[in-house]
Image (cartoon, rainbow, N blue to C red):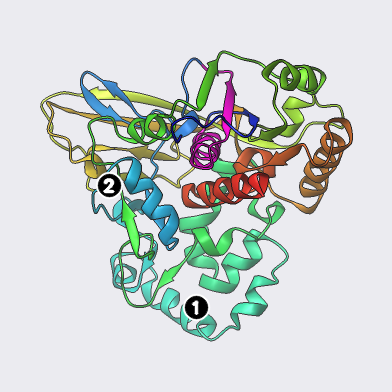
Amino acid sequence: MSPGKTPSMTVLIVGAGLTGCTVAHRLASHEVRSVLYERAPKPGGLVRSDRLHGVLYEPHGSHVFHTSDDEVWGLANAVTPFNDYRHRVSIVIEGRLLNWPILLSDLDRQSRGQEIREQLEARRHVDPAARAAAASFEDWCLELMGPILYERYVKPYTTKQWGRPPSALSAIWAPRRVAIRWDDDPYLFGDPHQGWPAGTGGYTDLVEGLLDDPLITLRPRARVSLRSLSADMAREEAAAAVLTCPLDELCEAELGGLPWRGIAVRAVHVPHVEQAQPSMVVNYPGLEYPFIRIHETKHASRQRAAGTVLAFEFPGAPGRHYPVESPDSRRLNEAYMALLRERVGSRRVRFAGRLATYRYLDMDQCMRQAIDCADDLVR
């Protein structure tokens, strides 16, 4: 803040995950004070990194920063430097470690390879717009790859991850998560900007750097509800509130609960081994495995430390990690938005981030929403 100037207003932000922290950082650049209410003891939410026996790892699963948004990439790197890590994912198919996304060169390493090629070739020229109109995630995948690859790579993994058949899931996020690589490009993301935090604290450096401004106040272990929100705003002298939290939880399920999918990650330190698996993430689609993937952060962090950490991700745990998108759940979240606008005031409340907007967003999309939300408030 410029010497002698006072903040133009105060904004209450509910939730100090990546979205909330970015909103606060952007508001501070406009000389606007913010107060973040976070129910956890520390900020950062699911992106915060940690250490086990001195080894840096991610307690909520792997996060890889990738974006085509120059402004977002510039902001992230201005807060903390990033390395040039590019993300590769392995997957266990018929007892072999293959690549995800699916590579044509991997087809000959599995049974029924010729049948698979015929099924792929029959679908190679399917109109992408027609596939985008698929009724379900299952339909979208079958139109892309055919039944053999779908049954091996996608169906069991999706059933485990979401706790419901793929036919009951929306196809809206399928293009971002499932692909066939005709050019054999092994990397998961094609964005021009990719990397992982290069500092000693991983994503914790990004979170704490975003909050490093005298105009930002963090209140950890703070709980907020719809019943308390107006009083909380009055106490903080806040002209507006930005909600980045789950709206059904904030409103104490007044209109009913939204469907969410939670995960549990269990980390194990493996001594005397530099790296224990060939890539940062290995997927285990088979129903015989109770976990869905294993994460090894050292591939991205490039940390030099004794041993490594393997983090096993189990689906179906309590928690609000992933929104289960459908037309009905979308309408319910929009009804919660309308309820909050009615009770708090349409000009006094904004929504940003994966939890509040009930959308499957990547980190760069969360930061973009946060930047736009802050700029809109200032305007």
Callout 1 crowding tier (Cα within 10 Å): few <14, some 14–19, many ≥20: some
Under circle 2, the secondary element is loop
Q: Amino acid at mark 2?
A: Phe
In this rendering, the answer to whether 113 lies above or below 212 is below
**Which residue is pictured at 69% across the width and 69% down the height?**
134
Q: Nearer the viewer, residue 90 or 354?
A: 354
Q: Nearer the viewer, residue 95 or 281?
A: 281
Residue 251 in percent (x, y) is at: 79, 26
Viewed as shown, does residue 25 lie left or right of 321? left
**Which residue is pictured at 73% across the width and 22% down the height?**
233
Asked whether 156 falls inside the magenta stretch, the response is no
Which residue does the numbered mark 1 point to in the structure image? Answer: 119
In this rendering, the answer to whether 338 lies above or below 177 is above
**Which residue is pictured at 70% across the width and 19% down the height?**
224
Residue 82 image label:
2
Q: Nearer the viewer, residue 218 or 184?
A: 218
Range drawn in magenta: 17-40
Under circle 1, the secondary element is helix
